[in-house]
Amino acid sequence: MSVQISRGQVADAFVEKVESVSGQDLLACYQCGKCSAGCPMAKYMDILPNQMIRFAQLGLKDELLSSKAIWLCVSCQTCNTRCPKGVKIAEVFEAIRQVELRQRHDHLDFNALGEERLRGLPPIALIGAMRKFTS
């Protein structure tokens, strides 16, 4: 038995924000699982890519934002190329991260890393981490 959801059932501010920032229609995803099957980071995620889309579809903001998975996506775009509906899943994940970061909830505290450790990291790694994990 499949469950059909309509636009009126997900008229939630979080869902609207994610769709607005990502430019994607979350309801276009019909949960085929191809994104999860091809994701090189799926084995490290607590919620698989198709499950993250489903959580977003249903407006399960707290569950989604507390997951480790949204931060583990490496934006390789494999999910985008595998999606039969053309949903740009990596953009949805980036939008979810942006929703969290725009509330000033940084995912990484550089001060906690310590000066010695920061000096040992390549500058490009620091820049990339700042772009992805901080507001």
Image (tube, helix red, strand yellow):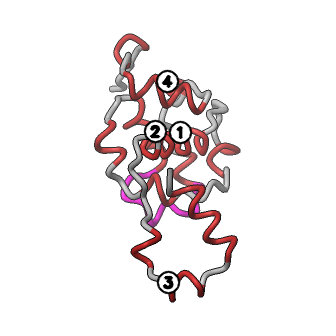
Task: From the viewer's side, name the closer residue of 79 and 56.
Answer: 56
Q: Reading the chain from its start, which is encountered first: label 4 or label 3?
A: 4
Q: Is residue 25 left or right of residue 82?
A: left
Q: Which mark is residue 99?
A: 2
Q: Report, in whole angstroms, how far the alpha carbon at label 1 lies from the one at label 3.
A: 31 Å
Q: Reading the chain from its start, which is encountered first: label 2 or label 3?
A: 2
Vertically, is 116 above or below 66?
below
From the top left corner, tell me how far across and down residue 86 is, in percent. Answer: 67, 32
Mark 1 sits on what residue? 95
Mark 3 sits on what residue? 115
**Helix, strand or loop at disc 4?**
helix
Q: Report, in whole angstroms, how far the alpha carbon at label 2 lies from the one at label 1.
A: 6 Å
Mark 4 sits on what residue? 27
Vertically, is 95 above or below 68?
above
From the image, state whether disc 2 or disc 1 is nearer to you.
Answer: 2
The type of residue carrying mark 4 is Leu
Q: Which mark is residue 17?
A: none
Q: Report, in whole angstroms, how far the alpha carbon at label 2 lies from the one at label 4.
A: 19 Å
Q: Reading the chain from its start, which is encountered first: label 1 or label 3?
A: 1
Q: Reading the chain from its start, which is encountered first: label 4 or label 1?
A: 4
